[in-house]
Amino acid sequence: MANMSLKKVPMPEQDPKVRARNFQEVTLGYTAEQAVEEANRCLSCKNPKCVEGCPVNVRIPEFIKKVQEGDFKAAYEIITSTNALPALSGRVCPQETQCEARCVRGIKGEPVAIGRLERFVADWYRENVNAMPTKPEGSGIKVAVVGSGPAGMTCASDLAGMGYAVSMFEALHTAGGVLVYGIPEFRLPKAIVANEITKLQAQGVEVMTNMVIGRVLTIDELFEMGYKAVFVGSGAGLPMFMNIPGESLKGVMSANEYLTRTNLMKAYNDQADTPVIRSKAVAVVGGGNVAMDAARCAMRLGADNVYVVYRRGEAEMPARLEEQHHAKEEGIEFKTLCNPVEILGDENGRVKAIKCIRMELGEPDASGRRRPVEVPGSEFELDVDTVIMSLGTSPNPLIRSTTPGLDTNRKGCLIVDENEMTTRQGVFAGGDAVTGAATVILAMGAGKKGAAAIHKFLQENK
């Protein structure tokens, strides 16, 4: 029976006061009954605009139809025909600006909760079936994938499904890339990522950790070892700073370092080998999803006061609305239209405060957003002992600096053609290494495109 409610079925979640002090997943997921109820809000449009909004073209009305029927296994099979990682994208994909933004139910109410349904289907399958893929008959042709994040995992999965002998190289000691070092446990449980890595290995993908390409091995050496093509999905892990006075003080760090220590190194566990400062008051500079993650981690690590300092207004914040909403519920204070000008230290060289100036929005800049302008004489100080810079990232220069013929743009991103091939023959790239920091689902789309391009290249150059 059709559900004509204008509102989505609410997602069960932990109480804000409880979850603000633990690292368990915030949202608890739909029950089967809730999933069917929400699926019945879908109108099964003959010309589904939602599919056009999906970077990997998930057959959305088809899988939702199967959820309506209670055939969750079939729904999973439909999703994974184009999306290899639905449990991940269902949690961290910005559906509100992609598939759900095109949903006709959103014209006079809330769109169908496509992301929540995708997550439900993936979780149901993992908990009730979790069949491992079989290793296809191989061609013996070797392909290297550099990076084990969403672009690399998707590319490796597609290539393995085509019968290639795929080796995936990860610089850190755990595979998963940004999914394990960047996104906190309370948004994406690491057991889910580990399960996807296990699936890749079942497909025949060789997963090699502690392999810093450009240091342990170069791209040239990979070709010498018999790899016929290389896909670079190494992400964008080089953090940016403001270059203001006081950034060298103890207690100032990048969001990358803070999140890596917290997520990958389990710094929230007192027995962890790599601890992180247990702050009392924290300022996170930036307004994106990474800033929200860092701020919410700081609260869970015991901070009494956590501030998000952002130079534009709340309406201009690039973070997902859901992440902003959850952060506020957990007690994080937003200091918008404020910009740091100096970090102040004590006699021991530790952070004691951050000096900010108030801003107002002026004329639009080249990006179309209104440029923030300082308000003279409006400086103020926030008493904090930790400052986390979350200002964006760029690709690490290691690979481009050790690979002759590999061109980048002025931001250090690899240049690719319409087939995802770089300026070096046989070397393909996708994800943040090409675009700069972007979303998980866009990286997955680039991984799919890269796999198809590599297949075409290898078939034409046998």
Image (cartoon, rainbow, N blue to C red):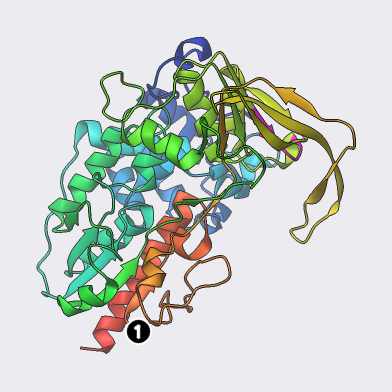
| Residue 16 spot, x, y in % from top left | 52, 14
Along the horizontal axis of the image, is 2 left or right of 174? right
* Quadrant of the rendered image containing residue 68: top left
* Quadrant of the rendered image containing residue 447: bottom left
| Residue 257 spot, x, y in % from top left | 43, 39
- Residue at position x 22%, y 71% in the image: 143
Residue furthest right in the image: 376
Tell me if residue 427 comes above or below residue 239 in the rendering.
below
| Residue 158 spot, x, y in % from top left | 27, 63
Tell me if residue 275 comes above or below residue 82 in the rendering.
above
Please report the bounds of the magenta region as a residue range: 308-313
Along the horizontal axis of the image, is 307 left or right of 226? right
- Residue at position x 21%, y 73% in the image: 222
Q: Residues within 10 Å of mark 1 (few under 14, many from 20)?
A: few
- Locate the C terminus by quadrant: bottom left
Q: Which amino acid is tagged 1?
A: Gln
The mark total stands at 1
Instruction: Name the residue that disc number 1 marks.
Output: 425
| Residue 318 spot, x, y in % from top left | 64, 43
- Residue at position x 58%, y 55% in the image: 49
Say whether residue 71 is visible.
Answer: no
Q: Circle 1 sits in a helix, a strand or a loop, which is it? A: loop
